[in-house]
Amino acid sequence: MIKDDDVVVGTHGRGFWILDDITPLRQVTPATLDARAYLFRPGQATRVRASMYTDTPIPPDEPRSENPPDGVIISYHLKAAAENLSLEILDAAGAVVRRYEKGVNPNPDPRAEGHWPDLWIAAWPELKANPGLHRFAWDLRRPRPDVTGFSFPISAIPGRTVPEPLGPFVPPGTYTVRLTVDGDTLQQPVRVRMDPRVKTPAAMLSARDSLQLELYRAVNALGAAQKQVRTLRESVAQQSNGVRGPRADSLPNFDRQLAALEGAGGGRGGRGGAAGRGIVQIPSLPQLQGELMTLYGVIEDSDSAPTSQVKVAARSRLNQARTALAAVRRLATVVEGR
């Protein structure tokens, strides 16, 4: 039988098989296979949480079968090998929410850490550029937050466990899949719907998604600011070696302020904070990022509306993040002499 975009085959015994996503079979023609490149229109995508099983993992030798890939399957055909290949997901406003590129992986390989057996870890998605029909799965999420650490959930799945934290889900709606093959661009729409089992009203779900996205963007901004602060401190050290006069006297103060933002000392609770001439005392960038990620994780845990306590805490930390980022911008203007 055919159920939506899957083919289900059963026997008179206890076995059954499912062929996931036959959308390419419904669209394929001699012309599609003769084209230099062809992007098939994806089927409907459903925003479903990958694993709600929170206990220890099932042993690897337990009889089981694989579930379909998380998210939506994107199928494309290449008549010849592609030198340059990229896949982008665009929202209704045309903004890129996710980008993949042949041979480029922006995330560190968790296998390099050596703390987990490789058999549990999912391979990073690979955008294949050789001739033939290819499937690529987008998990309906934005890229991972810009944080240095990651971990794996206790509910591991052999060969399918991905590092956390994950990027936020995109909200339900219509998106555009854009495949670029050696300069030629192909596009197809894809509709993302909410898990029909989730009964959260649409307005509450939208507010939840908006707050999580705001936290996500603040976390990324703080991550970029930490890199900028390290560069500014290097610049201050170089200037200190070759500058004389009033500016030379002010450089140590700039470095103290940058060090406090970096969490290197002088801050609240011994974790660093920015204090000094013209700067109110605020938590350090790493501390703020960690607190925002805690709130981000609370919201990530479910598709329900955040509690009032979470919303109040989020607003407080977001305001502190804006103050800290403004301090970095001010110090960058002074140190770089703009």
Image: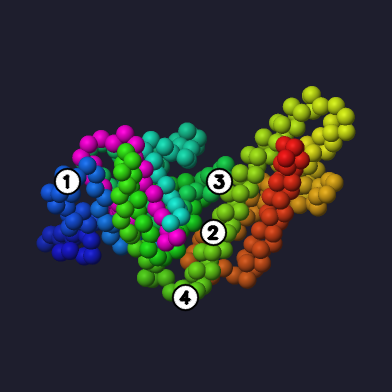
Magenta segment includes 217? no
Look at the image and give the residue range highlighted in magenta: 64-93
Magenta segment includes 71? yes
The residue indicated by pointer 1 is 33
The residue indicated by pointer 3 is 146
> Cβ–Cβ below 8 Å for labels 1 and 2?
no
Q: Is residue 136 left or right of residue 152?
A: left
The residue indicated by pointer 2 is 213
On the question of residue 164 being in view, the answer is no
Image height check: is 37 above or below 16?
above
The residue indicated by pointer 4 is 201
Along the polypeptide, which appears first: circle 4 or circle 2? 4
Along the polypeptide, which appears first: circle 3 or circle 1? 1
Name the residue type under label 4.
Pro
Q: Is residue 125 left or right of residue 149?
A: left
Residue at the spot 49% in from the left edge and 53% down from the top edge:
167
Along the polypeptide, which appears first: circle 3 or circle 4? 3
The residue closer to the viewer here, 35 or 261, is: 35
What is the quadrant of residue 121 in the picture? top left
Give the class, few, some or many, for how many residues have Cα within 10 Å of label 3's Cα (few <14, many ≥20). Answer: some
Give the class, few, some or many, for how many residues have Cα within 10 Å of label 1's Cα (few <14, many ≥20). Answer: some
Residue at the spot 40% in from the left edge and 44% down from the top edge:
100
On the question of residue 26 being in view, the answer is yes
Instruction: Indicate which label's residue lies in the foreground, 4 or 2.
Output: 2
The residue closer to the viewer here, 142 or 11, is: 142
Along the polypeptide, which appears first: circle 1 or circle 2? 1
Name the residue type under label 3.
Asp
> Cβ–Cβ below 8 Å for labels 1 and 4?
no
